[in-house]
Image (cartoon, helix red, strand yellow):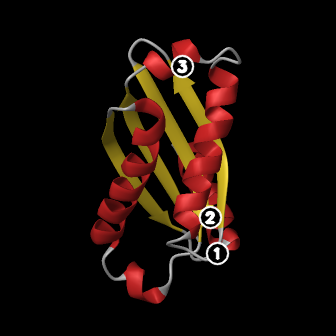
Amino acid sequence: MAIIHIHLQCNDRFIEALPEGIEHAELMVESLVSQVLLELFNTVTVNEVTIKQAPLGVTLQCETDIDQARQGDLGATELLIENVVSQVLQELFDTVTVDEVTIKQLSSQREEIDSDSGEQRNQNAR
């Protein structure tokens, strides 16, 4: 499993035209990004979409499976995600600039919990 963080900036003309506002736009972004990432990965769960105005910024966090072939070159996978996400969101926002795509590989939920506990123990030891 892996967590993907995507930060991007968009043209905000689209948001102003939506009568439903930002919440509706977040749902649209979630749907579009899920669909395009499902073309790359077997499973995708979008955990969070946040849209902020002035300038319009979009932050996404999702969980996905990354197969062994893609694990070897996460930089290429990040670039691929950047390209497909920016292409699909250009249909909504016209102009999209991807600031960052990061992939954090999680080998298991247990390791994440152990890692978090270790960090807390280290901080308490100080």
Estimate the x, y position of residue 115 in percent, counting from the top left: 58, 62
Please say if 62 is above or below 49: below
- Classify residue 62 as left or right of residue 79: right
Q: Nearer the viewer, residue 88 or 40?
A: 88
Q: Residues within 10 Å of mark 1 (few under 14, many from 20)?
A: few
Q: Are marks 1 and 2 in contact (CB under 8 Å)?
A: yes
Residue at (58% x, 49% y) in the render? 32
Estimate the x, y position of residue 4 in percent, counting from the top left: 50, 56
Q: Residues within 10 Å of mark 3 (few under 14, many from 20)?
A: many
The answer to which quarter of the image holds residue 11 is top left
Residue denoted by label 1: 108
Indicate the amino acid at tag 3.
Ile
Estimate the x, y position of residue 58 in percent, counting from the top left: 48, 32
Estimate the x, y position of residue 122 in percent, counting from the top left: 54, 52
Question: For the residues carrying marks 3 and 2, which lies nearer the camera in this image?
Answer: 3
Please say if 119 is above or below 11: below
Question: For the residues carrying marks 1 and 3, which lies nearer the camera in this image?
Answer: 3
Residue denoted by label 3: 15
Residue denoted by label 2: 112
N-terminal-most mark, 3 or 2: 3
